[in-house]
Amino acid sequence: MTATTTRVALSLQGVVAGYGQEPALHGVDLVVPEGSIVAVVGANGAGKSTLLRTISGLLPTSAGDIRMGGVSLAGVPVEERIRRGIVHVPERRQVIGELTVEENLRLGALWRGDRAERETDIAEVCEFFPALAARRKALGSTLSGGERQMLAIGRAFVAHPAVMLLDEPSLGLAPKVVSDIMTMLAWLRAEYGLTILLVEQNVRTALSIADTGVVLNLGRVVATRPAAELEADEQLRHLYLGF
Amino acid sequence: MSTVLLLLGAGLARGAVFALFALALVLIWRATRIANFAQGAMAVTAAYVAYLVLIGTGSFPLAVVVVLLAGAGIGVGVERGLMRYLPTASPLNAIIVAIGVVMVLTGLLGILFGADYKPISVPFSREPITVGSLAIVSPYTLFVFVVIAVVVAGIGLLFTRTSLGLAMRASAFDEEVARLNGVRVVRMRTLGWMLSSAVGGLAVLLAVPTELGLNPHSGDLLFVNAFTVAIIGGLDSPVGAVVAGLGVGVLLTIVTTLWGATVGPIAILLLLVLVLLLRPQGLFSLRKARLA
Amino acid sequence: MTGTRDVSTASAAPAPVRPRRPHWLLTPSSWTPLQRWGVTALGLVLALGATFLLDPYRNYLLAVGTAYLCAIAGLSLLVGRTGQLSLGHAAFMAAGAYAFAFTSNALADESVPSLVHLYAPFLVAIVVAAALGAVVGIAGARLHGPYLAGLTLALVLALPALTSLMSDVFGGDAGLYVSVERRPEWLSQLIADEQWQAWVGLGAAALVLGVLAQLVRSPYAIRMQAVRDDESAARLSGIDPRATRVTMFGISAATAGLGGGVLAYVTQAASPGAYSLSFSLFLLVAVVIGGVGTLAGAVWGAVVLVLVPELTSSITEALPLPAELSQRLDGNLAIVVFGVILVVVMLVAPRGINGAVGSLVGRLRRRRP
């Protein structure tokens, strides 16, 4: 359904990965076109977080290929993947509580050498997250859940991602806050052409801003559809998403 | 009045050495969550290397440079050669292996240099300067103070103002997030060991001239004293290490002046027991101690 | 039984092999208390008999080894079962040794029955060491890991300072001479002095091993395990982690105190030099190399602890070296060797000799039909 001229930012082919004996992912195929938002949904234990951890390198693959802009990521250690443009915002934000807001943001841009550029980007993030700007010097541990999510996204943005991997950003947040964050993500895509791979338990929220929806069940992709179609498909929803 | 000033000066200088050593311990703790029980032995080994350079060239400044380099080298060696291979499951394992390192180093030093005290001479007078009729402080004490202040300030700046410092702190607080942001955590760890070891060596080198001399077991007492200081200040807190170090230094100097040098270890033991019973997380720590 | 099966399948399926149950001696974990005490008693009798075969020096070494064993066994259980690392356990041996010295010397002047003069000092040693252990244990039991280790380190370093400070009481660096109850008159024709000393030591070691072996099978051991594995769960089950830890600390201090008493008895001296930091660390090496947390491991450890310094001494003497170097090697070589052993064992074979033997026995057992 996507135009054939759109470039592919991230692609997975036949990826098998997991913890211990049993793989959690059994041959996953996935394509994330540039400038699009792809939502990965599925029941608990479907393998959604595992998928993101495999892409960012925290979990090794036992088979299959992951490519960024056509170039394989095989053998690239975790620390280097950010340099290839993969920025992973893990589950539960993982804002470093002992660092200030500003330091957390700086952390995202550390891998880029240029100091001046870094400062400009941080200033930019502060502009579109005024709540954070007001608390630049505050410790990460003093932020609310919503503020932490914003900080995590801000930190990811400062890293100049080619693809942003977001793991359950709505977890533990109030609906209003979730809505704000989703609006922000959609805006980032519209304004900067940011490519996002979004993993979400909250299906409606995810599909509301996504272009494509991927349904994962027990480590396998069972459906890849345009978001609107997926949302309308009651049968699929009942089967795999529990509502 | 003069005695009080002298005591204060001597106490602060001693405390500064404790502070520096405790800072080294805190550095490693924050970077790796390992309490480096081999710190004393590693530092003394670096000091012996500097000692050799000193008697070979007679240059104290060169000895200072060498102790930093040797310390860094030993730190890298221990981390790369040993600590890296430890299964991280049990913190006890790290302590036991560190004890093994202590034994190897102490034993080797004993074999190579013998148990006698090797005095270290410094190009600063140890006689106090007098202003009017007041004897205030000796040039050497001043020197120690200045050096340590510079080092502590330098480390403080490193950690709070530089990218490297930020990377090291991030690695210590949350390894996974640090890695995801491109920080080479393993390298940061090694750096932490290097820095800590170099600083520890410097502390020993500065402390020795005021004592009988360098000895393979010099590290034992220094470690316990610095460990006590680190606990009082809070293992997580560099500021705590400095403040507690100065305080304990003054306290210890007063005690040993009143009752003799042998009282020292007993006083430290009592202090440690007191702190552990009353406020185990230390005075400055942000977190609560891991209580049983 | 095979009526419904036809002939072809009956011959194809081999008769089931019944596993041969290993002899009860090979499975210590399944012994009844009677078997346990029986084996201990038998072992003791054999060891006592063995002393006749050894020369006086070797008997002396044996006696020293049993003293070490008392301390190592307690320390091994402390580290292995409750995860408390004591780097200064020699201090508890010292407490026992000095307590023994005071008591034995005091009783020597009185006209007390010889049995009292023999046993009472040991009892006092145990009690004093246990008390000290309880105090230290309470201070350290609140916290994990490095805190307790650092505290015990401070303790063992403060010891020589204490004896120096109150040198009129403790005899300073030279220590105290201990006048002891020697072997009974009626035995003096049969056994030598050193043999008697070995017997006393063996008796103490047997007692320690017997008690600890009992402890390890008791409900108390389960409590220790619970505290070790999951403290919150243990607390919810009504187990007090702190009390459990302090108790074990006290017990390990008590056994160390008994060991110190034996040393004081055998060497007829109590001095700070014998209970240094280095020696404390040697105890730890013995625990680890033998196999932490096991009593059999403690025995291995005690053997190693006695043999290695003897070995290094012989090597040092055998080499043609200038006197000064020789003197420097003496003592320090043992330290280096122990340090290397400790590191290697921790990295390569953390379960120590006992673990290695266990794997070997397991492998042999599996190979038999």
Image (cartoon, rainbow, N blue to C red):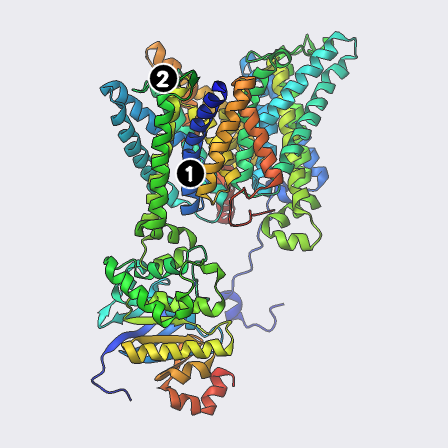
Q: Name the kind of residue labelled 1 in the image.
A: Leu
Residue B116 in view of the camera: yes
Chain at tag 1: B
Between B209 and B142, the residue placed more toward the observer is B142
Q: Is C60 positioned to the left or the right of A109 in the image?
A: right
Q: Outermost residue, front direction?
A: B132
Report which residue position mark 1 lands on: B23
Q: Are discs 1 and 2 located on one and the same chain? A: yes
Q: Residue at x 55, y 56 (%)?
A: C17
Vertically, is C41 above or below A56?
A: above
Q: Quadrant of residue B130?
A: top left
Q: Quadrant of residue C99?
A: top right
Q: Residue at x 54, y 17 (%)?
A: B260
Residue A134: give x, y in percent of width and height.
Answer: 42, 65
Vertically, is B41 above or below C52?
A: below
Report which residue position mark 2 lands on: B118
Tell me the tag on residue A57: none
Q: Outermost residue, left direction?
A: A5
Q: Name the kind of residue labelled 2 in the image.
A: Lys
